[in-house]
Image: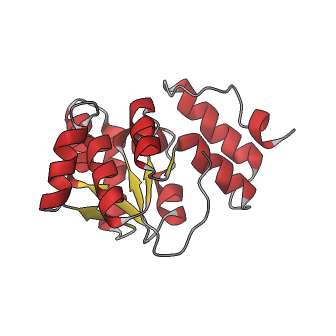
Amino acid sequence: MPERRLGAHHPFWFDTVVLSNFAIAEEIAWLGARYSGQGRITAEVFEEIGAGIAAGYSMLTSVDELLHKDLFTLVQLEAAEMRQYRQYRNALGSGEASSIAAARSRGGTVVTDDRAARAVCSRERTKYTGTVGILIAACKDGQIALDTAEDVFQRMKAHGFYAPLMRLRDVIEP
């Protein structure tokens, strides 16, 4: 579902895959500007990013900019959130499970492309969006031109991002 612009204090809980998509497309700075003060990264997502860097995905180091520039906030799960996280871990990865646990406890929108995580969000009545939703919303609210968003989307796909559509235009333009 496309992300909607919400209040300035509405948190967006990013998982590893969405951050990776924007890092691979070299658009972390843009993502940071769009979600400045609203972006949240759990310690579990941060660890997954670190594992990706250690595995040779050096472009993921750009995610650190979001934290070093205080655009996004690094969050530790609290005890009650950890219990929920452990339950979600039965079916989800660490990043997705922690993002959903935090969003359920603290409010906000989970930012994930993971189908299983989206199913949990739907079941738990937790708002969610993903890479495509972010790009569509940015076009609709005039932050970026459709051609720019399309270029970013195609670069992501060239690096292995799977999306259920070929072009953003297919969704944005009739």
Quadrant where the N terminus is found in the figure:
top right
Write the residue at 35% across / 61% down.
40
Q: Which of the 4 quarters of the picture holds residue 6?
A: bottom right
Q: How many labels sit on residues?
A: 0
Which residue is depicted at the point 52% across and 44% down?
130
Residue at x-position 54% and y-position 74%:
7
> Going by the image, does 100 lie left or right of 170?
left
Residue positioned most to the right: 174
Residue 173 is at least partly visible in this image: yes
- The percent coordinates of residue 54 (x first, y second) are 19, 35
Nearest the camera: 23 or 114? Answer: 114
**55 to 126, vertically: above or below:** above
Query: In the drawing, does residue 158 fall left or right of residue 50?
Result: right
Q: How is the image coloured?
A: secondary structure
Residue at image point 45% right, 31% down: 115
Left/right placement of residue 65 relative to residue 164 reads left
Of 46 and 85, nearer the camera is 85
Residue 37 picture location, percent across and down: 42, 72
- Residue 50 image point, x, y percent: 21, 43
Q: Measuring from the top left, give residue 19's x and y in whole percent.
A: 41, 45
